[in-house]
């Protein structure tokens, strides 16, 4: 916090202003003191006292309500206030003071030691003001509009200091960090007053502070009362705040007096030893909600107390209570004492000015130079949580971001763009996985294949053509073959030259491949209809006793997962069964005997045979072959009810397609029977026979941005609008075999974390940020580093950390500070 010290001295007709700051910088200006200002102040004071002459917290009147007088004192007071402030401002806007005003403004703008309060996000400076005469001290310096002529100027914290300060401001560290603030409330003479409002106002702090009330009781001896007051002040536990309510007056010699009982007062000098001891035990702030407190404030600062708030003029009882309520409310929100005083004065000026004119000019804060403004520290979980919770404007923006983050189309679009960026990042950093041969061979029945075989209607697919492909693959010793075509309906058309029905021809080809050595394991497709009934393979084509049947449903962009529990009504994903069959077939010679081979004469479900074989021979479970991420987690299943996909693994399209699968048209497989080099690894690959993008196919999906990027980067760039279901299944098989499943962290979760980080950043920024540009650097570098780290974590750990929503959330906390005109640099 930038600090200035301003000394104002009055010599005959002149006033000397001396401003000092920083490392010895100093400015001085001399200007004539206008006698008319003294007259205006006297007229205002006289009118002020006449308007508030009843129920003052001083010895000037008796109890009662505001008097109804034939003179309109309200109007006269408003006029007197306007005249006083006009002359005061005119004097302070003198050309002689321009350099001082400019120095405060310019140094404030260039200051590298700024402070932001947790609640108002403003930058302030402290201006310690010392007036060397009582005449000057009575003027309303807090109303000085220093920054009126300088644009984008911020708040000045006026802190008055006495001319003489004899004692240091020190306290025992034993009392520095209390678990709860301690407040001593001294209720003085209640004659003509009512302290019920004061009690209620202070009681707002009960949850934050230990509060003790003391005061005169009818019949109590005055000497005993003074002893009680003195004893309470020097409590062994110490106090943080001292509050006095009642009558008080200025005294030149005894440092001010406080009326503690009817016709009985105690002077500051009488309790000076007790106050010094209280200061050593942690007393930091005193509030005197009573009349004419200039002497009291000067005396307490002279004793080394950190801050004292007083009323410079007589104050009406009702005004004192309105002020105290607002002050305590602000203090309860962990504002410092200056902010609390400003809020209370602002309330008197804006909300109560018609009823209580001029009262906002009365409160003043006195302080010991270079001491931290007191605020009730945040203690306890609820209070700390309150500090972290967003403000109204922050909450509105966070709510909007939350709604956007829960919108699945928005999630899908952001996910697609993020995976596209991952693909670019992979290529730029050379982190593309290289394999000698892709684990999947995708045999695609494309438009050219249909034309060559003269297939006019590919729905359902010609069974003879499928049989030809199965025969060719079996001849090449394919070990695991998946057929991504539904075989649940009979196919009557006969294109077989031998005269057999197409379904019989396909069944014969499948059985022949199963019986041969090495045998072929088939995974066939299943799908649920609208009534949740399974459409599987016709029994005359294949049996689940010697083949595996998996569902071919596809969630674009997401992996198909294995259910948590094994239920007869559920079927495993098509891609999962292909990967499982491959693992069982090629897991190693030392375990080669335990894999149950498909047998045409089997009477038991083939998948049940596999699970029983694994359990009996190895004590394994089929789920252990792959990453636990391939299994549906409870939290993911719960999110489905909310319309979300929390922690559901995604398909990593950032890996180039050529590293995932080898693609070949069906007609090429059949016509290139002599080209053995092209199919040299076919026996080690998972084979998928699938539609190749012809118009009638029902599993054509829009090309993801990342795949489109890889198509463009190919040696012969291609433009495609669709990605087939077979290609998606190939990616899923690849991820399972390589235990490569990427978990996306939900945007909603990261927004919550970003809210905490953003709020914490704004709360601690005043302690860690010294320059505005440092916060810019921190914001830009932080988001950049987080982005790069998230890109690498995606590749190294298979975790997708969102970037857009967390960055926007952090921005709503930090950017208002950076862009605010009240944020100085």
Image (cartoon, rainbow, N blue to C red):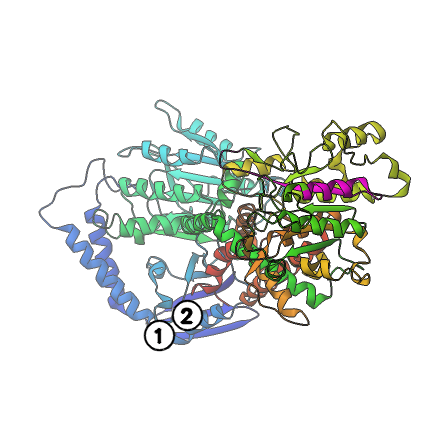
Residue depicted at 33% across the width and 69% down the height: 92
Vertical relation: 334 (above or below) 190? below
Q: Which residue is mark 1?
A: 31
Residue depicted at 88% across the width and 36% down the height: 593
Vertical relation: 606 (above or below) 100? above
Q: Can residue 262 be seen at all in this image of the molecule?
A: no
The percent coordinates of residue 443 (x first, y second) are: 68, 55
Q: Element under label 1? A: strand
Residue depicted at 45% across the width and 65% down the height: 6
Whether 512 is among the magenta residues is yes
The percent coordinates of residue 320 (x first, y second) are: 31, 42
Classed neighbour count for the residue bearing mark 1: other residues with Cα under 10 Å, few (<14), some (14–19), many (≥20):
some
Classed neighbour count for the residue bearing mark 2: other residues with Cα under 10 Å, few (<14), some (14–19), many (≥20):
many
Q: Answer left or right for 216 relative to 305.
A: left
Q: Answer left or right for 713 relative to 277.
A: right
Q: Can residue 691 be seen at all in this image of the molecule?
A: yes
Callout count: 2
Whether 516 is among the magenta residues is yes
Q: Tell me whether circle 1 and circle 2 mark residues in contact (CB < 8 Å).
A: yes
Instruction: Say which of 740 and 9 sits in front.
Output: 740
Q: For residue 720, what is the image quadrant?
A: bottom right
Instruction: Say which of 248 and 103 sits in front.
Output: 103
Instruction: Say which of 434 and 214 sits in front.
Output: 434
Lower sequence index among marks 1 and 2: 2
Q: Answer left or right for 172 relative to 131.
A: right
The percent coordinates of residue 257 (x first, y second) are: 38, 42
Q: Which residue is mark 2?
A: 17
Q: Element under label 2? A: strand
How far, Cα to Cα, is label 1 from label 2? Answer: 8 Å
**Segment colored magenta:** 505-532
The percent coordinates of residue 502 (x first, y second) are: 64, 44
């Amino acid at each position: 916090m930038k600090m200035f010290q301003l000394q104002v001295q009055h010599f005959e007709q002149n006033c000397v202003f001396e401003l000092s700051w920083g490392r010895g910088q100093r400015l001085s200006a001399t200007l004539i003191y206008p006698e008319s200002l003294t007259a205006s102040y006297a007229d205002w004071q006289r009118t002020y006292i006449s308007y508030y002459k009843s129920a003052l917290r001083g010895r000037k009147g008796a109890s009662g309500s505001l008097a109804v007088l034939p003179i309109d004192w309200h109007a006269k007071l408003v006029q007197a206030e306007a005249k006083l402030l006009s002359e005061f401002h005119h004097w302070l806007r003198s050309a002689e003071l321009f350099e001082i005003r400019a120095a405060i403004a310019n140094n404030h703008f260039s200051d590298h030691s700024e402070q932001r309060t947790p609640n108002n996000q403003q930058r302030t400076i402290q201006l310690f003001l010392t007036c060397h005469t009582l005449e000057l001290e009575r003027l309303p310096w807090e109303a000085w509009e220093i920054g009126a002529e300088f644009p984008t100027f911020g708040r000045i914290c006026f802190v008055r200091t006495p001319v003489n300060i004899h004692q240091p401001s020190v306290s025992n560290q034993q009392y520095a960090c209390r678990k709860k603030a301690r407040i001593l409330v001294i209720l003085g003479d209640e004659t003509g007053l009512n302290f019920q409002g004061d009690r209620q106002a202070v009681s707002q702090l009960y949850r934050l502070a230990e509060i003790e009330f003391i005061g005169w009781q009818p019949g109590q001896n005055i000497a005993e009362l003074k002893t009680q007051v003195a004893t309470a002040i020097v409590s062994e536990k110490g106090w943080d705040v001292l509050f006095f309510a009642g009558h008080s007056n200025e005294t030149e010699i005894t440092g001010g007096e406080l009326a503690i009982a009817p016709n009985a007062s105690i002077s500051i000098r009488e309790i000076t030893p007790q106050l010094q001891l209280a200061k050593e035990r942690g007393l930091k702030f005193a509030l005197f909600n009573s009349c004419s407190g200039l002497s009291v404030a000067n005396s307490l600062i002279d004793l080394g107390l950190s801050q004292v708030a007083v009323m410079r003029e007589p104050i009406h009882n009702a005004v004192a209570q309105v002020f105290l309520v607002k002050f305590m409310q602000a203090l309860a929100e962990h504002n410092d004492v200056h902010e609390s005083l400003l809020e209370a004065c602002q309330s008197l000026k804006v909300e109560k000015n018609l009823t209580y004119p001029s009262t906002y000019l009365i409160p003043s804060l006195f302080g010991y130079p270079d001491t931290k403004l007191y605020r009730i520290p945040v203690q306890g979980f609820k209070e700390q949580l309150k500090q972290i919770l967003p403000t109204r404007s922050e909450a509105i923006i966070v709510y909007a971001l939350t709604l956007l983050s829960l919108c699945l189309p928005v999630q899908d679009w952001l996910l697609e763009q993020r995976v596209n960026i991952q693909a670019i990042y992979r290529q730029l950093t050379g982190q593309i996985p290289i394999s000698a041969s892709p684990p999947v061979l995708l045999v695609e029945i494309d438009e050219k294949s249909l034309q060559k075989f003269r297939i006019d209607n590919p729905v359902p697919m010609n069974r003879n053509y499928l049989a030809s492909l199965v025969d060719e693959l079996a001849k090449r010793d394919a070990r695991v073959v998946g057929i991504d075509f539904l075989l649940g309906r009979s196919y009557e058309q006969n294109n077989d030259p031998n005269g057999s029905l197409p379904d019989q021809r396909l069944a014969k080809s499948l059985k022949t491949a199963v019986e041969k050595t090495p045998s072929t394991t088939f995974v066939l497709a299943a799908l649920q209809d609208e009534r949740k009934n399974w459409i599987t393979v016709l029994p005359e084509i294949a049996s689940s006793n010697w083949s595996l049947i998996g569902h071919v449903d596809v969630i674009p962009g997401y992996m198909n997962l294995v259910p948590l529990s094994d239920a007869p009504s559920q079927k495993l994903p098509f891609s999962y069964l292909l990967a499982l069959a491959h693992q069982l077939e090629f897991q190693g010679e030392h375990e080669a005997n335990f894999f149950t081979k498909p047998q045409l004469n089997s009477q038991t479900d083939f998948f049940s045979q596999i699970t029983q074989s694994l359990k009996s021979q190895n004590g394994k479970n089929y789920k252990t072959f792959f990453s636990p991420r391939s299994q549906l987690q409870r939290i993911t299943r719960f999110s489905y009810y909310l319309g979300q996909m929390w922690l559901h693994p995604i398909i990593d399209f950032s890996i180039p397609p050529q590293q995932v699968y080898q693609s070949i048209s069906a007609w090429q497989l059949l016509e290139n029977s002599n080209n053995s080099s092209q199919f040299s690894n076919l026996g080690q690959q998972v084979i998928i026979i699938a539609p190749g993008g012809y118009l009638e196919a029902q599993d054509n999906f829009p090309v993801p941005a990342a795949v489109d990027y890889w198509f463009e980067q190919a040696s012969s760039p291609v433009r495609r609008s669709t990605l087939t279901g077979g290609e998606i299944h190939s990616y899923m098989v690849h991820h399972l075999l390589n235990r490569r499943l990427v978990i996306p962290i939900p945007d909603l979760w990261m927004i919550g974390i970003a809210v905490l980080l953003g709020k914490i950043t704004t709360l601690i920024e005043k302690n860690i940020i010294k320059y505005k540009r440092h916060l810019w650097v921190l914001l830009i570098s932080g988001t950049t580093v987080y982005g790069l780290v998230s890109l690498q974590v995606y590749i190294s750990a298979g975790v997708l950390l969102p970037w857009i929503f967390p960055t926007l959330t952090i921005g709503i906390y930090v950017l208002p500070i950076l862009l605010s005109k009240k944020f100085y640099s």
